[in-house]
């Protein structure tokens, strides 16, 4: 891989996907709870998160050709998706403060948009020039953040209504993104 290709695909430590991925990995392990952790556990979590981000955060710019169908090969080929899903799952396991939820909700679509733009090349960069794709990603992320804070237990009726509306909004945002892509092809 040439030096120019390496920089363009996000393998440099200061590339956009790598920096956002490192920040996402750190935010996912709940830095607000660090004062309550022991030193060894904290060091293990931070080192594991950073190593995982260094492996998975760079954009995968390969043709989607399957040489083998083993789970490890699939995970390696789709490591950007595995990284984003793992960060989301780890962040969702805890009970972070609202400010950290907002940080996670902002970093996740930023990471996914940056990786998609690098992986798709000029087509991906063109998607980011318009407002629809980033706005749809921000709206879906905001909807998830609202749903995460909606009280659905204790008899609060409005929480379920807000949750249902946010799920519908996220589905609409995903549909808009797919429709926009299909419209450009056709």
Image: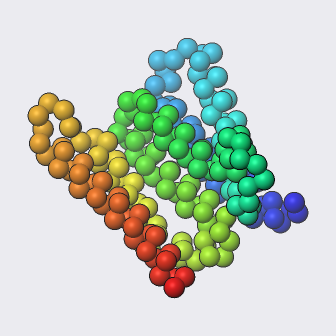
Q: Nearer the viewer, residue 11 or 99?
A: 11
* Quadrant (top left, top right, bottom left, bottom right) of the N terminus: bottom right
Looking at the picture, does residue 65 appear above or below residue 86? Answer: below
Report x, y in % for residue 21: 61, 47
Q: Which residue is outermost to the bottom? A: 186
Is residue 62 in view? yes
Q: Nearer the viewer, residue 13 or 91?
A: 91
Q: How is the image coloured?
A: rainbow
Left or right, residue 17 beside residue 11: left
What residue is rendered at 73% in x and 63% in y?
63
Q: Which of 83 and 14 is in front in this view?
A: 83
Report x, y in % for residue 14: 71, 53
Is residue 54 in view? no
Report x, y in % for residue 86: 55, 39
Report x, y in % for residue 130: 49, 77
Looking at the picture, does residue 80 appear above or below residue 31? Answer: below
Label total for image = 0
Q: Quadrant of residue 131?
A: bottom left
């Amino acid at each position: 891989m040439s030096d120019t290709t390496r920089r363009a695909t996000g393998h440099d430590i200061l590339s956009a996907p790598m920096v956002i991925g490192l920040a996402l990995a750190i935010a996912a392990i709940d830095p607000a709870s660090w004062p309550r952790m022991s030193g060894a556990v904290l060091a293990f979590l931070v080192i594991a998160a950073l190593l995982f981000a260094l492996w998975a955060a760079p954009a995968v710019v390969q043709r989607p050709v399957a040489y083998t169908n083993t789970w490890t090969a699939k995970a390696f080929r789709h490591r950007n998706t595995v990284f984003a899903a793992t960060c989301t799952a780890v962040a969702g396991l805890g009970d972070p403060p609202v400010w950290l939820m907002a940080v996670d909700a902002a970093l996740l679509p930023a990471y996914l948009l940056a990786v998609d733009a690098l992986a798709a090349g000029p087509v991906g960069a063109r998607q980011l020039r318009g407002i629809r794709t980033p706005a749809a990603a921000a709206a879906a992320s905001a909807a998830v953040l609202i749903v995460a804070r909606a009280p659905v237990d204790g008899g609060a009726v409005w929480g379920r209504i807000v949750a249902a509306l946010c799920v519908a909004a996220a589905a609409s945002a995903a549909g808009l993104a797919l429709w926009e892509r299909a419209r450009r092809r056709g």
